[in-house]
Image (tube, coloured by chain):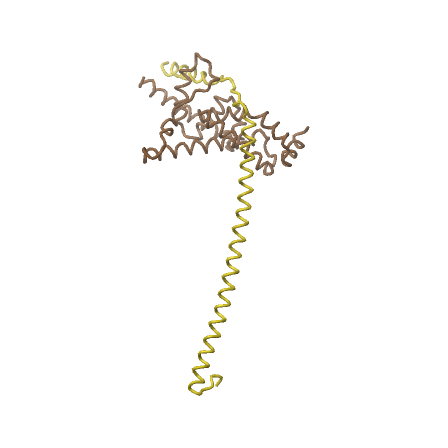
Amino acid sequence: LSDKEFISRLRQGDESAFKYLVECYQDKIYNVILNILHNAIEAEDAAQETFIKVYESIHEFRGESSLKTWMYKIAIRKALGKLRNQKYKERLHLIMPFWIHSEVRGVKDVVINPGIKLEDKEQAATIFKAIADLPHNQRVAFTLVRVQGMKHEEVSDIMQLSIKAIESLLSRAKGNLKNKLKYYQKLS
Amino acid sequence: MMKHTSDVKFEKMLNSISYIIEQKAPEYFYTRLKSRLESELKSNEMDVNDRSIYIIYVITVFIIMSIIFNVNYNTADKNYKNNIESLASSYDQNISN
């Protein structure tokens, strides 16, 4: 089955084609989101929202990029939406600490990806904590390149930014991380 | 030299997150997704139905209101004319003049 045929079957609402798409990409989409959000429940929710969006708007896919890149774009948008939501809840919790549910207090707590090697867990926890404090764009670019191992070109397609802009985001992210890690080390 | 050492240390730290084993999506991911998708599609359908019912409701109310207004206006106009005519006749005047 060619890509065109597959996409046309998706556009017709073919359930078996959609199931195949989900089974092919669910791990990749889930991992990208998990590495950005550091929260398994939120990551599953955002991954589901991603596939729902794909199902609903497949007719808008014009084939300018690959289907995979288009899905990653949606996934990143959903992850960023969750991050914004978390920030909004944190602010609300600061204003009305008794009105907002106590669950919100744990938003910044970093959940370590179970895929990290045991000997690296402690270090990884510190780095993920620092990554969680980065501005959203830097956080996404850094995660896609350093954690997911994507190429700069691929990240530039997903984030719809030039390669130079991605490199600049990465270098700023690195600088910020360095400062934050120094700060954490001083604290400990 | 110090800077170089700290850079190497920093890079080493970053490497700890560079080789993460890919996680599998939670079990029954597709089953949960399918039921969520079906319920969302259902609620979207309901939304469309609700919207059309709402539009029909507004149009019906508008038509009824305009009929009531039209009937009332005509009756009021007739009553007004009748009153004037009766007043005129009581004073033995012709309003057509």
State the quadrant of the N terminus of chain A. Answer: top right
Total marks in image: 0
Q: Is residue B95 left or right of residue A61?
A: left
Q: Is residue A24 left or right of residue A112?
A: right
Residue A58 in the image: state x and y as whole percent: 59, 36
The yellow chain is B
Name the residue: 58% across, 34% down.
Answer: A55
Name the residue: 63% across, 32% down.
Answer: A15
Name the residue: 56% across, 34% down.
Answer: A54
Camera-side residue: B62 or A142? B62
The residue most toward the bottom is B92
Up-down relation of residue B5 to residue A91 (above or below): above
Residue A16 in the image: state x and y as whole percent: 64, 29
Q: In which quarter of the view is residue A131 placed?
A: top left
The brown chain is A
Camera-side residue: B64 or A107? B64
State the quadrant of the C terminus of chain A. Answer: top left
Residue A77 in the image: state x and y as whole percent: 49, 33
Camera-side residue: A9 or A173? A9
Q: In which quarter of the view is residue B9 placed?
A: top left
Residue A149 in the image: state x and y as whole percent: 51, 21
Camera-side residue: B83 or A123? B83
The residue most toward the top is A119
Name the residue: 38% across, 33% down.
Answer: A89
